[in-house]
Image (spheres, helix red, strand yellow):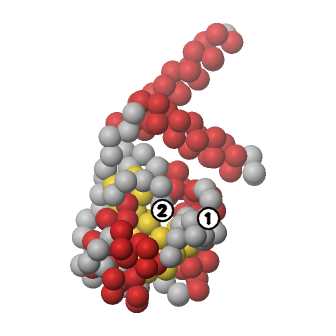
Amino acid sequence: MIARILSFLVLAYLLGYALFAVLLPRPAGDEKTDAVVVLTGGANRMERGLDLLKRGRAKRMLVSGVARTVRPAELAIRYPGHDSLFDCCIDLGREAVDTRSNAEEVSRWMTKNKLKSLRLVTTDWHMPRAGFELSRRLGGDVEVIGDAVESNPSFRQLFTEYNKYLLRRAAVLVGV
């Protein structure tokens, strides 16, 4: 009986991983939101956020998890052609060090700016956990649209992220 239960749990775990890997989120449509939130740490995230802002898909953008030493002028140099956006519409969040603190930082920023909808820009493999953390923190007051940046993650990267996602869900379930 114990062997069957363990076999079932292992099978459920492996099927969950397969679904996680196969059903990675996709980029969102072209709908407008009040804000774009870019979580640092992955390729093409900033480019996607800047493009959305430049095309008027949002009024403001928060880049969450920026190192304290980075200045807006440095980012403007790194992403040429967006100088005016860095002057008017982009805020740099410097408090976040992980996905959980990204959600806290975004929540404070959304409240401070009285914004009601956001487009979350992060890598496809990171979106499930980032979306979960953000939805938990914001509750039902803010509409969140996931806008995944497509990537080509390795087996190991997906496996690690799947386990982080499961552990975080379990931690929330037990109240941690």
Comparing 50 with 147, the one in front is 50
Q: Is residue 54 above or below residue 41?
A: below
Residue 94 horizontal/vertical position (percent)? 59, 71
- Distance in Å between CA atoms under marks 1 and 2: 9 Å
Comparing 104 with 73, the one in front is 73
Comparing 56 with 22, the one in front is 56
Residue at image coords 38%, 49%:
124
Name the kind of residue labelled 1 in the image. Answer: Ala
SS category of the residue bearing label 2: strand
Count of all numbered marks drawn on residues in the image: 2
Quadrant position of residue 166: top right
Residue 61 horizontal/vertical position (percent)? 42, 77
Name the kind of residue labelled 2 in the image. Answer: Leu
Q: Quadrant of the N terminus?
A: top right
Residue 28 placement, left or right of 64: left
- Residue 36 shows in this picture: no
Residue at image coords 40%, 88%:
87
Numbered badge on residue 74: none
Q: Residues within 10 Å of mark 2 (few under 14, many from 20)?
A: many
Residue 99 horizontal/vertical position (percent)? 58, 56
User: Badge 1 is on which residue?
Assistant: 96
Residue 174 horizontal/vertical position (percent)? 74, 46
User: Badge 2 is on which residue?
Assistant: 39
Residue at image coords 33%, 58%:
44
Quadrant position of residue 21: top left
Q: Is residue 22 above or below residue 146?
A: above
**Mark with earlier residue (1, 2):** 2
Query: Pointer 1 and pointer 2: residues touching (CB < 8 Å)?
Result: yes
SS category of the residue bearing label 1: loop
Q: Residues within 10 Å of mark 1 (few under 14, many from 20)?
A: some
- Residue 156 shows in this picture: yes
Residue at image coords 53%, 36%:
160
